[in-house]
């Protein structure tokens, strides 16, 4: 019988220690989009038990975030510019220190993906 501590090997060869995967949960532990000590501590604690961690959604567009939270100086993480790379690298190091697999969950703002409704309605009219 398999247990939560048993490793999993995926078809492409990646192996995770144990069967617990932490889903992405928005912590609002960033400060102006940067990784903070709070974020590092949060993920360090979870890397002690999870086999894989999916990092909270992180914006990749300056116009798409970071979103604000209940606290004035806290918001989601972002990586739309190279200035955010050192913090993300530090976050990856903290998580991988325990041999945990890491998956970044990038977020693209919906308004960047949606084409003008005017254009869509004209296009749909032509298709009919």
Image (tube, helix red, strand yellow):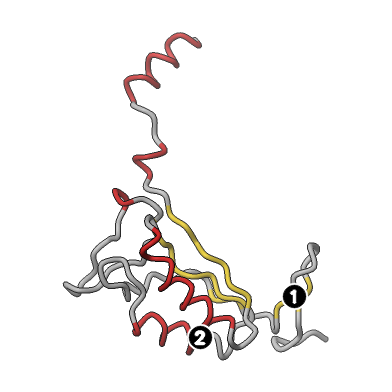
Label of residue 40 in the image: none
Question: Crowdedness of circle 1 by 10 Å Cα count: few (<14), some, many (20+)?
Answer: some
Q: Residue at x 52, y 65 (%)?
A: 104
Quote the CA–CA distance across marks 1 and 2: 18 Å
How many marks the image carries: the answer is 2
Label of residue 15 in the image: 1
Q: In this view of the protein, which residue sits in the foreground, 38 or 2?
A: 38
Q: Secondary structure at mark 2?
A: helix
Up-down relation of residue 121 to residue 13 (above or below): above
Q: In the image, 22: left or right of 116?
A: right
Label of residue 46 in the image: 2
Residue 11, position in %: x, y? 80, 63
The N terminus appears in which quarter of the rendering? bottom right
- When asked about the image quadrant of residue 4, the answer is bottom right
Q: In this view of the protein, which residue sits in the foreground, 7 or 63?
A: 63
Q: Secondary structure at mark 1?
A: strand
* Lower position in the chain sequence, tag 1 or tag 2: 1
Q: Residue at x 23, y 64 (%)?
A: 68
Question: Crowdedness of circle 2 by 10 Å Cα count: few (<14), some, many (20+)?
Answer: some
Q: In the image, 29: left or right of 105?
A: left
Residue 91, position in %: x, y? 47, 77
Residue 32, position in %: x, y? 25, 67
Q: Residue at x 43, y 66 (%)?
A: 85
Q: Residue at x 80, y 68 (%)?
A: 13
Q: In the image, 102: left or right of 4?
A: left
Q: Residue furthest left?
A: 72
Residue 120, position in %: x, y? 40, 21
């Amino acid at each position: 019988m398999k247990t939560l501590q048993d490793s999993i090997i995926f078809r492409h060869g990646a192996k995770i220690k144990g069967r617990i995967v932490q889903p992405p949960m928005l912590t609002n532990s960033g400060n102006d989009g940067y990784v903070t000590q709070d974020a590092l501590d949060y993920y360090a604690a979870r890397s002690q038990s999870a086999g894989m961690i999916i990092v909270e959604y992180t914006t990749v567009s300056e116009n798409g975030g970071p979103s604000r939270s209940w606290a004035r100086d806290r918001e989601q993480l972002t990586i739309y510019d190279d200035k955010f790379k050192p913090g993300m690298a530090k976050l990856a190091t903290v998580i991988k220190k325990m041999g945990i697999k890491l998956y970044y969950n990038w977020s693209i703002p919906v308004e960047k993906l949606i084409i003008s409704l005017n254009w869509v309605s004209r296009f749909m009219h032509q298709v009919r």
